[in-house]
Image (tube, rainbow, N blue to C red):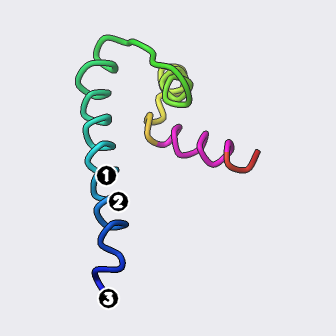
Amino acid sequence: MFAKYKDVVYQCVIVAIGCAIFGAGLDAFVLPHKLVSTGISGVGLILYYLTGLSVGSWNVILGCLEVAW
């Protein structure tokens, strides 16, 4: 039965590793220098600079709004 889900589990692990690398890069390079990226992350960064609410929280809020749209 595990063989059936092996590819899905592998893809989820790869996505999680990619998200961790993205988050580490965001904290290490973008936030200390007050840079802005593009897309939802960029809007989340701008809102973080304006309100102080964490970038991750803004990304979740904006992602939910995008899905609801």
Give, as a three-letter code, the residue at label 1: Ala
* Chain part drawn in magenta: 57-66
Give, as a three-letter code, the residue at label 2: Cys
Image marks 2 and 1: residues in contact by CB distance under 8 Å: yes
Does the magenta stretch mainly form a helix, a strand or a loop?
helix
Residue 9 place in picture, x, y as percent? 32, 67
- Residue density around tag 3, few if under 14, some if 14–19, many if 20 or more, within 10 Å: few
Read off the residue under disc 2.
Answer: 12
Residue 41 place in picture, x, y as percent? 49, 29
Q: Which mark is residue 16?
A: 1
Which residue occupies 31% across, 11% down? 33
Where 19 falls versus 2 (above or below)?
A: above
Q: Secondary structure at mark 3?
A: loop
Per the model, the C-alpha gap separating discs 2 and 3 is 17 Å
Which residue occupies 37% across, 12% down? 34
Quadrant containing the C terminus in the rendered view: top right
Residue 50 place in picture, x, y as percent? 54, 20
Sequence-wise, which precedes: disc 3 or disc 1?
Answer: 3
Q: Is residue 29 in the magenta section? A: no
The answer to which of 19 and 10 lies nearer the viewer is 10
The answer to which of 29 and 4 lies nearer the viewer is 4
- Residue density around tag 1, few if under 14, some if 14–19, many if 20 or more, within 10 Å: few
Sequence-wise, which precedes: disc 2 or disc 3?
Answer: 3
Give, as a three-letter code, the residue at label 3: Met
Per the model, the C-alpha gap separating discs 3 and 1 is 23 Å
Per the model, the C-alpha gap separating discs 2 and 1 is 6 Å
Residue 17 place in picture, x, y as percent? 26, 48
Q: Is residue 64 in the magenta section? A: yes
Which residue occupies 48% across, 35% down? 53
